[in-house]
Image: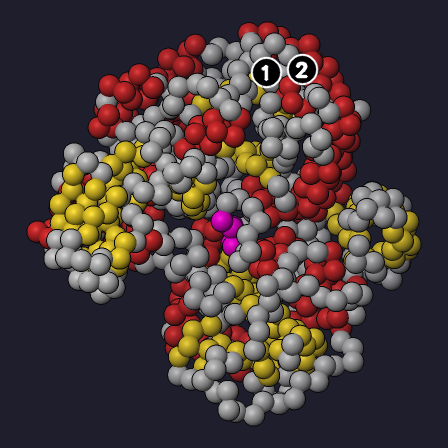
Amino acid sequence: MSKGRFTLPGEKGLEKEMALLIEKWGADAVRDCDGTELSGEAASLGANVYSTLCLIRADNEWAKRHPECRQQFYLMSEPMTARSDILEIDIMKGYFAQQFLPNDNCNLSRYWQVYDRTEGVPVPVTRWSYRDGVVTVMEASHYHVYTVSFLAYQIWEPVSMRNHITNGWAEEHKLPVDIRYPEAQDHLLNVLDEWLAAHPSTDVVRFTTFFYNFDLVYNESGKEKRVDWFGYLSCVSPLALTQFEQKYGVTLAPEDFVDAGQYNTLFKNPSDKYLLWIEFNAEFVSAFAKKCVELVHHHGKKALMFFGDHWAGAEPYGRYFKEIGLDAVVGAARDGVTTRMIADVPVAETEVRLHPYFFPDVFYEGGDPVFESERTWLKCRRALLRSPVQRMGYGGYLSLALRFPDFVEHVAGITEQFRQIHEMRRGAEPWCAPFKVGILNSWGGLRSWQTHQVAHSTWNQRCYSYLGILEALAGLPFEVVFLSFDDVEMHGVPDDVGVLINAGDAGTSWSGGDRWRNPRLVARLRKWVDMGGGFIGVGEPTASYYQGAFFQLWDVLGVQKELGFTAGFRRPALKTEGSHFITEDVSTEIDYGEGSSMIYASRQDTLALDVASNSLSLACGAFGNGRSVYLAGLPYSLQNSRLLHRTLFWCAGMEQDFFVWNTSNPMTECSLYPDASVLCVTNNSGFQQKTTVFSDDGGNFELVLEPYGWEWIRTDV
């Protein structure tokens, strides 16, 4: 059995069990977790010691003595309808009183705002007042709807709060400190220096993450109310707003943050002000994080950042991230998308913490953690074969995992597979198709491998139909780049990109919304496809109702969506093609997820490949020298992954190359590493599969693979 590349979560009092698992799982590092600690004996186990540190909640007593340095948040009250001249609004109704406390010590006329949502205008400050948690609106317009946008102190750090509630902790509530204040910066650097000196056995400091958590808001019952894994509301404070205005000459109002109750979610096209806010905080967070990392290095330790939790301003694909100087990044992986998201971060070492975490929501009597793990590992394995991380591990409470001996054995098998990937490929890159795939949306590279995510690949009804595209690509033989509309408008489509994908609901940042009203952008893309490019639209691509058209690239896509305005127009009859290269591996009904309805052919030469309820679900066609494909949706499945694989090669006009280093059976896949002269063939199903492997020289061969099995084959013999 090989050893190494594995980080074991430990607990004080389980040193004997940890020693056994270090041997069984081949661990070379042990770590504590939020809510656990390691004993002094951990350093004697012969493994490196990772220690978790969340600086902004490291000194609760100091936070109590400096309430002005607590982190703040912008909230919007529940909308209320006025039925008389006077309207009273309980601003904390619907929010968790243990999480937030209204900041009524600030200048309310500057930092709070009452809005008439019916007219869409702010209410003059002379017409409202505040007392004891209630805003009173005077001279209210009858039957207009009003809201209050207000600053609130965070009186319970949200991640600690979540873990506290989930795991039934009884510890004191942690207060989050805002590093925007100079006195907080000085204090936390001293805390870090003292902590480093007090932990001589720690080899790696795992920052969780740095300073500002993503938006995590709980309702009055202590349940999750709203989550935005990409939110920047925790960065707000009167000082931050003042510094922002001084730097950019732009004044931000409460409405710029609450955004009529939408809070600038990732799914909206970002305003210029919001993009500046992200830039402002990223530059500041990275600069202070760099000081923390330098202090860690001064003490002879390595600095690692957890990709999650307090990562606002420390986005790994952001402009300033490299300046922090981290040694490594670790993140939680529950699928191939999140695995690639971590693996592709530009640092020397990356690590995944595989799901399931050792938490009681999975590890309970009657639970099946092996089943949960198998689902995760099959997706993660596909991604690792394309872009490996250097290390793996788990998080949570080891004591819970030890109650499931079958899971302990199961993990031993996963660790062996993980190390074998590294041992067999020996650092070699996998073979890729002769063209790149571009994902086109409003965010581009900043959100690499992060499209259509509400909370780190958690299932969502409006997301899964699109997230399946990235899940498939995570394990397919393509190099993937993420492009923004600004990138394409200013620089065009990169020469090495063969196919562009635009996917999402109409109006969202992923589809593009009104970005498609830009004549320079649409003309440039039309020309690119006309000259030989490939374009794939999923759901409601290029959608913005303008000049009588909804899909602005209807001519390229060959399809259009009926909105009801032209219901009296006669449409061509829908007749599906008998067979096509794209659908040759389809054996069961195609799953389009939520799909899209009322899609019709907008050109006579559009080929209908699949129709549901008299609406096109899959169509393709030519546009000049290029090609396009429309899909109503694409959740992840083995069949859909193969469907996308074929679609990409057809769109690029390279069908013949589809049969190079590929397999005949859609339940199987292969990855070739030319420089290591090795090939890996995987069975991604729970049943034995027979498949033919196609090489690049016609030397095809057959294999039989056991359920979830794989085989490594030398190609130089």
Residue 494's x, y, as percent? 52, 64
Which range of residues does the magenta coloring cover? 450-454
The image quadrant that residue 667 belongs to is bottom right
Could you give the CA–CA distance between mark 1 and mark 2, rounded to whole angstroms? 8 Å
Residue assigned mark 2: 18
* Residue 161 position (above or below residue 470): above
Q: Residue at x 42, y 11 (%)?
A: 197
Residue closest to the far left? 126
Question: Can residue 458 be seen by looking at this rendering?
Answer: yes
Q: What residue is at 22 percent from the left and 65 percent from the top?
A: 119
Which mark is drawn over residue 497?
none
- Give yes or no for contact between labels 1 and 2 (Cβ–Cβ under 8 Å): yes
**Extreme residue toward the front, this view:** 84
Which of the marked residues, 1 or 2, is nearer the chain's N terminus? 1
Question: Residue 285: which quarter of the image?
Answer: top left
Residue name at image x 87 percent, y 44 percent: 706
| Amino acid at pointer 2 | Met
Are there few (<14), some (14-19), or many (20+) residues within 10 Å of tag 1?
A: many
Q: Which residue is mark 1?
A: 11
Q: Is residue 452 magenta?
A: yes
Say above or below: 318 vs 56: below
* Kind of residue indicated by mark 1: Glu
Secondary structure beneath dot 1 equals loop
Q: Secondary structure at mark 2?
A: helix
Q: In the rendered view, does 500 fall on the left or right side of 617?
A: left
Name the one closer to the observer, 300 or 689: 689
Quadrant of the frame with the N terminus: top right
